[in-house]
Amino acid sequence: MTKTKRINLTLPERLADYVQAQVDSGHFQREADFIRHAIRKMQENDTAANDFDLDAFIQAGVDSGRSKNSGSQIHKNARKRIAEVGKSRASK
């Protein structure tokens, strides 16, 4: 059995209402279930962010050689890729 520790949590009314709405909608049985779920999601996001290896991306770029695209096209493609990665992470 997992060890637990009881904490007392005070939220601004707006956040407390949101938590209650999640419970009322049937997604969670109790407020504590929602809070645990939210914390787990944050931990998953932290892990995903730590798995992002910028050095590997930079090295792959260096290893790929000189691009046939213009500087502005490279920049445009990079911004598009960053947006795609951001959307992918946000949907998880």
Image (cartoon, rainbow, N blue to C red):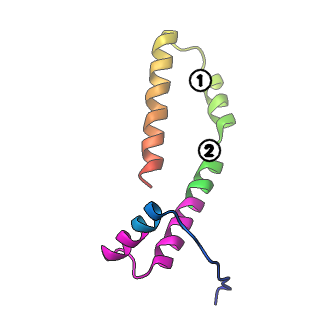
Rendered position, 22 above or below 58: below
Which residue is pictured at 50% across the width and 18% down the height?
Answer: 75
Quarter of the image that includes the C terminus: bottom left
Give the labeled residue for mark 1.
Answer: 64
Q: Main secondary structure of the magenta part?
A: helix
* Residue at far top of view: 70
Callout 2 crowding tier (Cα within 10 Å): few <14, some 14–19, many ≥20 = few
Q: Is residue 69 visible?
A: no
Instruction: Look at the numbered disc 1 and give the secondary structure of its residue.
Output: loop
Judge whether residue 28 can be spotted in this image.
yes
Q: Residue at x 67, y 29 (%)?
A: 59
Check the image and report above or below for 45 versus 69: below
- Lateral position of residue 33 relative to residue 54, left or right: left
Query: Which residue is painted at 47% across and 40% down in the image?
Result: 85
Say which of 60 and 21 sits in front: 21
Query: Is tag 1's residue or tag 2's residue first in the polypeptide sequence?
Result: 2
Q: Pick out the residue farthest to the front.
A: 13
Residue closer to the observer: 38 or 21: 21
Residue that appears at 58% across and 52% down: 48
- Quarter placement of the N terminus: bottom right
Number of marks in the rendered image = 2
Name of the residue lying farthest toward the left? 25
Q: Which residue is mark 2?
A: 52
Q: What's the amino acid at mark 2?
A: Phe
User: The residue under label 1 is which amino acid type?
Assistant: Ser
Residue 28 picture location, percent across and down: 39, 77
- Badge 1 density bin: few <14, some 14–19, many ≥20, Cα 10 Å: few
Q: Which residues are magenta?
A: 19-43
| Disc 2 element | loop
Question: Image height check: is 30 above or below 63?
Answer: below
Q: How far apart, in angstroms, are the residues tagged by discs 1 and 2?
A: 19 Å
